[in-house]
Image: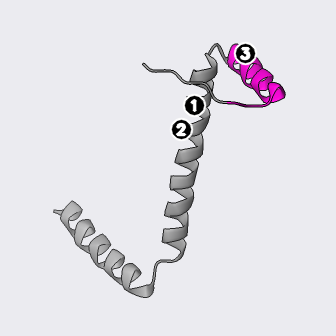
Amino acid sequence: MATTTIKVPVELRDRINKDAHERGLSAAGLLENLLDAYERRRRLEAFGRAFRDADAGYWDEFRSWDVALGDALDE
């Protein structure tokens, strides 16, 4: 794995290292976990927005599929 250096303030570096140490991770591992969680949260927020903004046509189709799939379960 290639490594690189990023410039961060000393205080931030110390916070990263402290938190990583407390979790038993490397600084890179901590940053990866934090970024993974941040990206997941953004995907879930986007899904929530799409769900809230769904128009009546979407819900009509949803109900049609819900009925069709429910009928299949009864058989």
Q: Residue at x 52, y 77 (%)?
A: 53
At label 2, the amino acid type is Asp
- Disc 2 element: helix
Q: Label 2 neighbourhood size at 10 Å, few (<14), some (14-19), many (20+)?
A: few
Residue that label 3 marks: 22
Q: Quadrant of the C terminus?
A: bottom left
Q: Which of 34 and 66 lies nearest the eye of the viewer?
A: 34
Q: Which region shows up in magenta?
A: 7-22
Secondary structure, magenta segment, majority class? helix
Q: Quadrant of the N terminus?
A: top left
x and y percent of residue 32 in the render? 55, 30
Q: Label 1 neighbourhood size at 10 Å, few (<14), some (14-19), many (20+)?
A: few
The image quadrant of residue 26 is top right
x and y percent of residue 52 in the render? 54, 73
The image quadrant of residue 25 is top right
Residue that label 2 marks: 36
From the viewer's perspective, is residue 17 above or below residue 74?
above
* Residue 49 falls left or right of residue 9: left
Circles 2 and 1, Cβ within 8 Å, touching? The answer is yes
The image quadrant of residue 27 is top right
The numbered dot on residue 33 is 1
